[in-house]
Amino acid sequence: MPTKKIKYSSDFKNRLSIINITQSGNSKKQIVPGNFGFKYPNRLCFFLDKKYAIANGMPEHIEFEGRWMFTQNFDLKFKITETKNVLSSDIVITGEIIDIDKKGLLFLFKTEVFNKEKLNIIELKGSWNVDEKNRITLILLKEKEKQNELVFSFAWTLNNKHEIVFAYKKRIEKTKIVLEKQIVFRGEWFVFGSNRIGFYVNLSNDSPIFFNARLLTRCVKEKGTPVKYEIGIGRKNIKRTLVFFGKWRFMSGNVIGYELRYKKTVYFIKFDFEINQIKKTKIKLSLISKHSKLDGAEIEFSKNIFGADFLATSKISKDEKNIIFGLTKKF
């Protein structure tokens, strides 16, 4: 009897089930040996065991159309798009994210084939971003379908290395065991403006994440004052405060660097600046990021911090340089 529709699903052992539904409404389910993988970027396929495929007159692989998303347990779910012969359904791949890099994520899972377990890894490729609620998303590369975004729906935190940490709980299938898991986004922060800061995933300049933020620090001293931003995350607008502790250092080219250190790593958040006010013993500068002016943000220095080497290489105006140089010599 001819098949009317096909429905695909998977079990907790990551085995593919195919349900053939006939015109009379009868159905037949078969569990097919093989492994999930990709033939094209992010396009889910199932590669059948070759001997089984030949013996049963089946293709060597099956391609699926649909969209990726996370389950509440942070397994991968592929929602199949309904077509003329295929019903809409979900394929859930049970496993865990094992790595994050500038190009995407790696997902590890086990598949049972002929009563033997096999480890598999799939790589979802795309570009990192955040949505309007500052939730981290991976925009997947796709050939035909509309844009597919994987959303990390829970609020993230920061560790003592200034890295983004996404913590979640994961239940082991068919058990009561719940594990504490975390995903770490390593990279580097940079300032984009008073209401925006950025993060380069794995130090990649071609994969920045931009967060909407609020600058809390309006005036800082040369010593002892951290730079603070507040970020709201998710539907509940959970607040996170990003605090930069470091030292201010003058660099050539009219640039101030805020030096951050952890373990053996050192990096700078760089600012241009404008002279705002010159007092008897202090100078106030307005900070300017590489991309936009930090409205109202200032830093206050004692005059004697300006050295002749800095003044000689800075691109500030001649009059301003003469003023500072004269005051530096005096104080």
Image: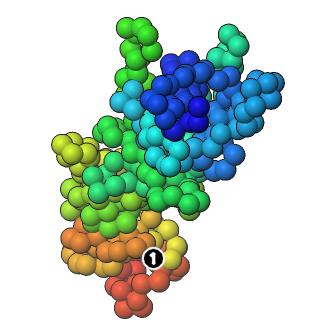
Dot 1 amino acid type: Asn
Residue at image coords 35%, 30% = 72
Q: Which quadrant of the rendered structure holds the C terminus?
A: bottom left
Q: Position of residue 154 (x, y in %)?
A: 32, 37
Location of residue 234 (image quadrant): top left
Viewer-side residue, 170 vs 6: 6
Viewer-side residue, 260 vs 106: 106
Q: Position of residue 187 (x, y in %)?
A: 51, 48
Identify the residue at the far bottom of this view: 319
Location of residue 295 (image quadrant): bottom left
Q: How is the image coloured?
A: rainbow
Q: Is residue 48 left or right of residue 257?
A: right
Neighbours of disc 1 within 10 Å: few (<14), some (14-19), many (20+): some
Residue 204 visible in the snapshot: yes
Residue at image coords 43%, 55% = 129
Which element carries disc 1, helix, strand or loop?
Answer: loop
Viewer-side residue, 117 vs 241: 117
Q: Is residue 299 left or right of residue 36?
A: left
Q: Is residue 16 above or below residue 99?
A: above
Q: Is residue 289 above or below residue 177?
A: below
Residue 91 visible in the snapshot: no
Q: Position of residue 86 (x, y in %)?
A: 51, 42
Q: Is residue 281 left or right of residue 40?
A: left
Identify the residue at the far left of this view: 236
Location of residue 117 (image quadrant): top right
Viewer-side residue, 259 vs 23: 23
Q: Is residue 160 above or below residue 115?
A: below
Q: Position of residue 310 (x, y in %)?
A: 49, 73
Q: Is residue 314 above or below residue 210?
A: below
Residue that label 1 marks: 254
All told, the count of numbered labels is: 1
Q: Is residue 128 left or right of residue 109?
A: left
